[in-house]
Amino acid sequence: MSREVKTKSNLEKVLAAGLFAVTGELGPPRSAGAAEVEEKAKHLHGNVDSVNITDNQTAVVRMSSLAAGLILQKTGTEANMQMVCRDRNRIAMQSDILGAAALGINNLLVLSGDHQKFGDHPQSKNVFDLDSVNLIKMVKAMRDERRLLSGQEMHEGEEPRLFIGAAYNPFADPEDYRVLRVAKKVEAGVDFLQSQCIYDMPRFKKFMARAVDLGLTEKAYFMAGITPLKSLGMARYMKNNVPGITVPDELIDRMKGVPKDKQVDEGIKIACEQIEELKSLQGIAGVHLMLIEWEHMVPRLVKEAKLGPSQRK
Amino acid sequence: MIIAERKPFEELKGFVADKKKVLVVGCRGCVTVCNAGGTKEVGILASELRLDAGKDGRELTVDEHTLERQCDPEYIEELVEMVGKNYDAILSMACSVGPQFISTRYPDQTVYPSLNTLFMGGALQHGIWAERCQGCGNCVIHNFGGMCPVARCAKSLQNGPCGGSANGVCEISKEVDCIWHLIATKMMETGKVETDFAPVQPIKDWSTSRDGGPRKVVREDLVK
């Protein structure tokens, strides 16, 4: 399924070559501590094709995704800079997009953004000038038409050549509508998509079958989101407290069935089984590993799941 | 209508702590309908202030008056005589428009807002009001099954629900409906998904909203 390559992105190169891609995730520190980013980057280096750098996730103030992304790139791993619609208007977005591309960012992943009510500044004003679908459209026009939203043109070679990503969530409601929501992102021009953490595999497969039927997987690369369960407590927390994530009872029971000190191993085992299933699932181009604050587990997971650059050689 | 609610009594008490004579002014418009600042609520606040002052042994005279509307200079004029009685403060029980009109007309008066003005909305049932409009200045609810995502989506999204929508409620609170859940469900039920809903909604122009600066409507045909 080789497709036209539009950017210098390593992730795009891997996907376009038809290899099963792997992306990771890194949460920047709540400080100016570059060393913390470098430390986390060590665990990801050589194990993934690129790494999402979150943009003030859960609306908690952190080092900017651009800055942390550049620190990561110095260590030899490509960044997927995330950008949410919560904190910037169209002026700031375009400005940061131009700056990021100028500094060597190749991938931009756009999201609505968690509401600030959850974060450490619930008193703040939010922006939401554009939504994520329109942000995709704007970045695509900047890249492919060399046009800012105002219509202002850019010289050839000076446009931001970014590989554009977004998220999709087959587990949020209304279930039947979810595939149409991602269809809008595809229509807007997204290049790759990463899903919310998958625990409910039957529901995910049902979703993907519809996405394949609608031809969406021919137009964008669909990656599947994986977060291994660390414990029974985490499984229960995800099931009961995280909007838009479903955890089936079978998984809860499976975690319950092993002693506490073996639950990490069981979580990794479940993740490996899921990844094995996803490798042969029609329309899935790779996996997105979300092990925030658990980055040191990435080398083990990619090894056991036989994933990533080091396993391809 | 404009929905408002009375400020906490402690805050109102603070406004009059060093005053001897105050006037509480109600409004027979929206705030009467939403039970926040009509004749009845003026009476209640005035009594509470008097009782509280009495309890503390403070001398405080509280007069009461309710205007037809506080958002119209014609009715604000009615206060001329009362203002002449040298009040130390006027407590307006209208939405925030009222105390601003009173302050402008009577610049030497100290005017306090007694309500917090919340939103444009309506009554879901007696005693429950909900937001419906944010005054963006370019109504497009017909694109969304007659529901407004600008006012009713916590993120004002124009192209469908975010990933935080679960069981029909918004990620910010189980008490808040996900408006996109309602819009999407209605579209699917009425078979309008493909025509009305699938197309990407254009980037919204906020210049007609508050973002374009304070707004004013001039109807030349009505201006004398």
Image: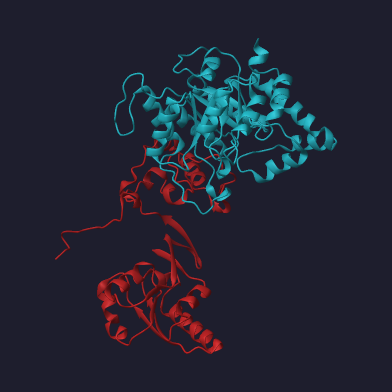
Q: How is the image coloured?
A: by chain
- Viewer-proximal residue among A229 and B40: A229
Looking at this view, is A205 or A21 the one in front? A21
Q: Give residue B174's position: percent from left, percent from top.
A: 59, 52
Q: Nearer the viewer, residue A295 or B98?
A: A295
The chain coloured cyan is A
How far across and how far down the image is residue B190, in percent?
45, 41
Q: How many marks?
A: 0
- x then y, percent, for residue A87: 47, 43
Inspect this view and state whether residue B194 appears: no
For residue B39, above or below residue A82: below
> Which quadrant of the structure image shows residue A25?
top right
User: For the view shown, which residue lies furthest in the top direction?
Assistant: A313
Chain B's colour is red
Q: On screen, B65 above or below A235?
A: below
Instruction: Kindly tell me whether residue A267 is visible in this rendering.
Output: yes
Relative placement, left or right, of B198 versus A172 is left
Q: Position of residue A18 (x, y in %)?
A: 56, 13
Which image quadrant: the N terminus of chain B? bottom left
Name the outermost residue toward the left.
B224
Q: Residue at x 34, y 50 (%)?
A: B209
Query: In the displayed structure, would residue A188 be above or below residue A246?
Result: above
A207 lies left or right of A128: right
Q: Quadrant of the C terminus of chain B?
A: bottom left
- Answer with the quarter of the image where residue B84 lies: bottom left
Residue ID at (68%, 23%): A275
